[in-house]
Image (spheres, rainbow, N blue to C red):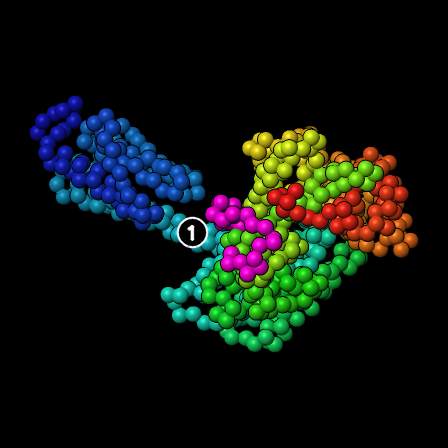
Amino acid sequence: MEIVNNEPYNKDFLLARISLAVLIFFAHYIFFMQLNGAAAQELLNNGRIQFVFSFFSASSLFLTFIFCFVILNFRCRGFVFIQILNGIPFLFALAILIKYNIFVLPGILNPLAAAVFLFFIYYRQRNLLCQFNKSKIEMEQLLYTDELTGLASRRKISDTLKNMTDPQASVSPFSIMFIDLDNFKVINDTLGHKIGDIFLQEAVHNISCHVEPDMLLGRMGGDEFLLIISGSKTDEELLSIAEKIEIGITRPFVYKNKNYSVTCSIGIARFPEHAQNDSEILRYADMALYEAKKRGKNRSVIFNSTLRKSIALETDIHYTLEDLDSGIMPLQDLDEDENQKISTFSLLFQPQFNTDTKELRGFEVLSYFTSKDFGYIRPSVFIPIMERNGDIITFGKWVLRESINQYLKIIKDMYNSPLLSVNISAVQFEHPLFIENLASIMKETGMPPDKLEIEVTESIAINSFDSVIEKLTAIHNMGIQIALDDFGTGYSSFNYLRLLPLDLLKIDKSFIDPIPHDKSGVNIVKAIIDMSHRLGIEVIAEGVETDKQFDLLKELGCDSIQGFYLAKSLPSQAL
């Protein structure tokens, strides 16, 4: 036997030490492989071997210093820190004292001690693995359960629908109901979100009373719920279930001795009769829900062939916009062949004139859609479709850019340049990048800010009024004029005229049509004009079609008019 650094040393002892180190390493390696399937990477660093284990987003460096200590014949006491998934380290104390280490005992005791120690490590690591599996189950329960209501979560509903429509599996017919509480926002705004949450929990209880074992009820978010009904159901059976839910929802909620109640709208779709996959059935149920809302709320609608046509129109609009935005097809005029083979968008320019001088004040841009399958479609039809599916952002940017480019060509040889007025939808206005997109297009096209007028409607003030004022002020500070369109058809609050940074107010055509014969209509128009002028706001009347209307508006002091009386909408080439 040799003496090295005052330690007994021979090949048997060295082999025992190396064997133990290798066994300990592989015990940890096997554990981490079980834990997350991560592979070990062997890195050479300054002549020493290190092993890196990566699990989840954090990298954990497990240094097998036992291996290094034994091979390099170090002497020390050491501690191994093993980082478990919840981020709380536990101290697996391992005192190493090479001089008195039982692992260097001679004979049969050495492998026996190594085996006992290895079993201890393996047992400890298995406990950790069990804890991990338990945490994993708890995590899945959290993912699949809505925290507020205790219903199935959106994730759970989504996964369930994917499994139920999986073409590789044996699928059975089922139906879904998209349930949306009508006017729940009023409860939230009136009583606060805390009471609103309690109201939601009560509503869930009322719905759950009608959920049978073959059904799954989940919360999709906010005040939207989805009910999955297994098996084939007739229209009558589905409507009967929906009626029970509607009745349950209307039960009053009592708060501070006051009764509060809401109704609900329900959209229904079936698989595989209506849809062939999970995304389709969700979309079709949502379309049916939208139809229920449009019909006056507090009702149920089953997806049908009429709604399928709406889907076809929506798809046509979407892909036409995609092609137009990418420059695949040219912009077309409305007067082209009605039997066109492609769908297209068109821009027309409606001239506006000064009432006193009949001089050209500006142009309002009007957009139209002509479908190869459905013919001419008005903005009042396709704009809501775009707002619902999100295409309005792309469409709005395209309209702004294209109308500016055409406008700049129109005014190229004009001495006094008129204004360009572009409509902005409420959804487009609320987009967080609206001002950034507006500024970018202005810079890209070289449009003079003082020649652009943005038209918004009263609906933009539904949500956060303060943020609306802030955004309009930012637009105004860019030098762009702001017009309030369709005044009188929405909330008709004169308070808006006082608070919003407006340059122009547009009186809706519905107020112009009855005059001059309807005296109450005349008085309303006069009041709007007088109030606006007192606030320093210009007024323009829309839809003026007769000389009597024009003469009266001039007499009442209306600043400008637009309508067929002086000029109809025309493509840019005709101006």
Residue 495 on image: x %, y %: 81, 41
Can residue 66 be seen? no
Residue 571 in magenta? Answer: no
Which residue is rendered at x = 40% and y = 49% of the image? 132
State which region is magenta.
Answer: 321-342
Find numbered disc 1 in the image and state the secondary structure of the residue it sits on: helix
Residue 333 in magenta? Answer: yes
**Is 372 on the left or on the right of 450, as rendered?**
left
Answer with the quarter of the image where residue 476 lies.
top right
> Front-most of 76 and 480?
480
Which residue is rendered at x = 46% and y = 66% of the image? 276
Please give the residue where the numbered disc 1 appears in the rendered image. 136
Residue 478 on image: x %, y %: 66, 30
Magenta stretch, main secondary structure, is loop
Which residue is rendered at x = 10% and y = 34% of the image? 11
Q: Quadrant of the C terminus?
A: top right
Q: Amino acid at mark 1?
A: Lys
